[in-house]
Image (cartoon, grey):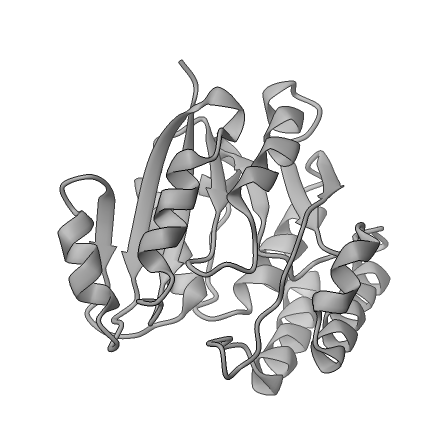
Amino acid sequence: MQKVSIIIPVYNEKDTLKELVKMVEKAQFCGLTKEIILVDDASSDGSTEILREMQHEYKVLFHAKNQGKGAAIRTAVKEATGDYVVIQDADFEYQPDDYDRLLPLLINNEADVVYGSRFLSKENLEHFMLKNKIANQFLTFLTNILFGSCVTDMETCYKAFKREYIQNISIKSNRFDFEPEITSKILKQKLKFKEVPISYKGRSHDEGKKINWKDGLHAIFALIKYRFSD
């Protein structure tokens, strides 16, 4: 029976964490056996205590100090044993059921990596804050200029990989610059890459969104850096 490793980085998500994990449990993931890996990035809001209670059911890893989303993903990728690896945030912006759109392309060997694109569905546009939409579209545009690609959503959380490919990529970024780094390395390796539309409901900073304009600058730097180096 094939298995999917579902990586969930967690930092201060106590209000959504339990329900999100329930949603992951209920989602089909194309009928694959699930390995849920949660990484607590030194939360300070009570998420750590919730995760300690989950240790008997799931693989839960803990960072002694806050390092960032990229570092949490790097920690989890090393522990993944599934045939496929996917990434899921610990909030409600993305719907786990949408992975049924991504995984078939991996299972049927039509792709090595699949991104869930928020911009391939017009229904999502009303759920973006204007500045976030412009920033995302600019970073994707810059990606395509630098790599001669046709990506529509570089910054999406929903990324699905055949495990051997994600584990063979050296992830160096600690924060949100994980997204441009992993995309850069995928495009440079000429892996079979596809995108499919997904649903999306963005949240505001008041609702817990953590990425900011400084992360946008880091993303630009990362795209340029990884275009010309590894």
Is any atom of residue 202 visible in this view?
A: yes
Quadrant for the C terminus, please: bottom right
Please name the residue shown 45% across and 61% down the image. 91
The percent position of residue 139, horizontal first and vertical second, equals: 74, 70
Q: Is residue 7 left or right of residue 110?
A: left
Quadrant for the N terminus, please: top left
Please name the residue shown 79% across and 72% down the image. 138
The percent position of residue 15, horizontal first and vertical second, equals: 34, 67
Residue nearer the viewer, 104 or 148: 104
Q: Is residue 120 left or right of residue 21?
A: right
Q: Write down the quadrant of residue 189 in the picture.
A: top right
The percent position of residue 144, horizontal first and vertical second, equals: 83, 59
Residue nearer the viewer, 39 or 130: 130
Classify 66 as above or below 55.
below
Residue nearer the viewer, 122 or 188: 122
The percent position of residue 150, horizontal first and vertical second, equals: 85, 51
Q: Write down the quadrant of residue 14 in the picture.
A: bottom left
The residue at the far top in this view is 1
Please name the residue shown 58% across and 49% down the image. 158
Is any atom of residue 230 visible in this view?
A: no
Residue nearer the viewer, 220 or 92: 92
Report the number of discs: 0
Please name the residue shown 65% across and 21% down the image. 109
